[in-house]
Image: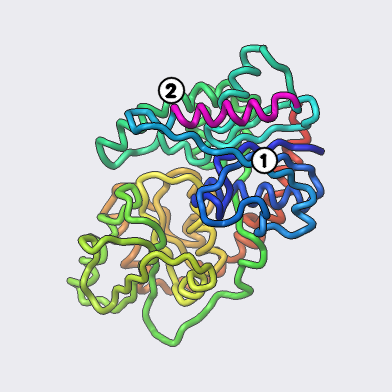
Amino acid sequence: MRIALITDGISPYVIGGMQKHSFYLAKYFAKHQIQVDLIHYNHSDFDIKHLEFFTNEEQSYINSIVIQFPTSVKFPGHYIYNSYRYSCLAFKIIKSQLSSYDFIYTKGFSGWKLISEKHKGTISCCPVGVNFHGYEMFQIAPEVKAKLQQLLLKSFVKKISQQADVVFSYGGKITSIIQAIGVKPKQIIEIPSGVEVDFISPTIASHKEHFTKFVFLGRAERRKGIVELNNALQQLISQKQTFQFDFIGPIPEELKLKHPSIIYHGELRDTKHIKQILQQADVLVCPSWSEGFPNVILEAMASGLAIIATNVGAISSMVSNKNGWLIEPLNQEQLNIAISEALTCSTLASKKQSSLELVKTQFNWDIISLKTIEAISKIK
């Protein structure tokens, strides 16, 4: 099988959840001895020519095609404009090779030109799939600027999704969004994301302290729910509860709470350091307004943590009362209650173990890659 994987970058050459997923797609296609034409770009100091984050054997199955992401002066819609230009560059590169592919997997806007040309009938080729990940432009926006950005994106995302042969969904509410914008159910392929097996802890970790340790991992974007989280923490402080809360990520000074039980680690890039902090915690808190299939939740589950998260994106396929608390977005009371319950939960160890088992049996790349390859091979 030969696949063209047209991406908007892969991790760590470009940072982001979409890019991490693209990296693992390329890696595991290669592990399964599938020839991959990988189209991507570099936004880092790493030498992308060497693909040093893949093994030698994996590299032998990957044809790395590096193009430069276009830039322009900033104006309303400049990202969409440059994304379209990028898709045109990608299309130009693979146009002469279209007949050699069994499937073309596109990420975000990177396949825009290809999908449009195939839909118009100006070219013929194998099936083309698109993955827009969280479809967050159709979810709740926390502020006016974000709402305007969503308005700019919606019509283009809707059109590309309708014109693609298949659309990949992580499940949960994402599938409902894809159907609502006019994609037929038979064109939707539900496959979650995952972590590598060697990232999964063998058992849940324990600590000597007899109180609950929480952790937040992410940026201080408004949509990540940090204001609601701070409100909940201030309630714990006023109640003089005993707890520990670790923040991993670039939290600005004005959002930091001054309390000895709250620790701010800043932005960490060392995976081992992050995993060490996760393994010493009990509960990950993810009170986002919108999400796709968050890597932070996967990594926390793989570290044996219970999860408090909002029911957005595909989170309902990851979190339930078995392994945590699934709450509604923007519901301060539910967030407060979930955190308070986690402080005295008699079944917390059971919830942590359930998270670990879910990752082992459903959300690891050994399983995800086989499901993806099987689904692709069945597309006509």
| Residue closest to the eye, 302 or 12 | 12
Callout 1 crowding tier (Cα within 10 Å): few <14, some 14–19, many ≥20 = some
Q: Position of residue 215 (x, y in %)?
A: 39, 67
Q: Position of residue 12 (x, y in %)?
A: 55, 55
- Relative to 280, is 92 on the left or the right? right
Q: Position of residue 264 (x, y in %)?
A: 33, 70
Residue 139 visible in rendering: yes
In the image, the segment drawn in magenta is 81-96
Residue 328 visible in rendering: no
Is residue 84 highlighted in magenta?
A: yes
Residue at the image point whose x is 81% and y is 48% from the top = 33
| Residue closest to the eye, 208 or 111 | 111
Q: Main secondary structure of the magenta part?
A: helix
Residue at the image point whose x is 78% and y is 48% from the top = 61
Q: Position of residue 358 (x, y in %)?
A: 60, 60
Describe the element under mark 2 as helix, strand or loop.
Answer: helix
Q: Which residue is identified by label 2?
A: 155
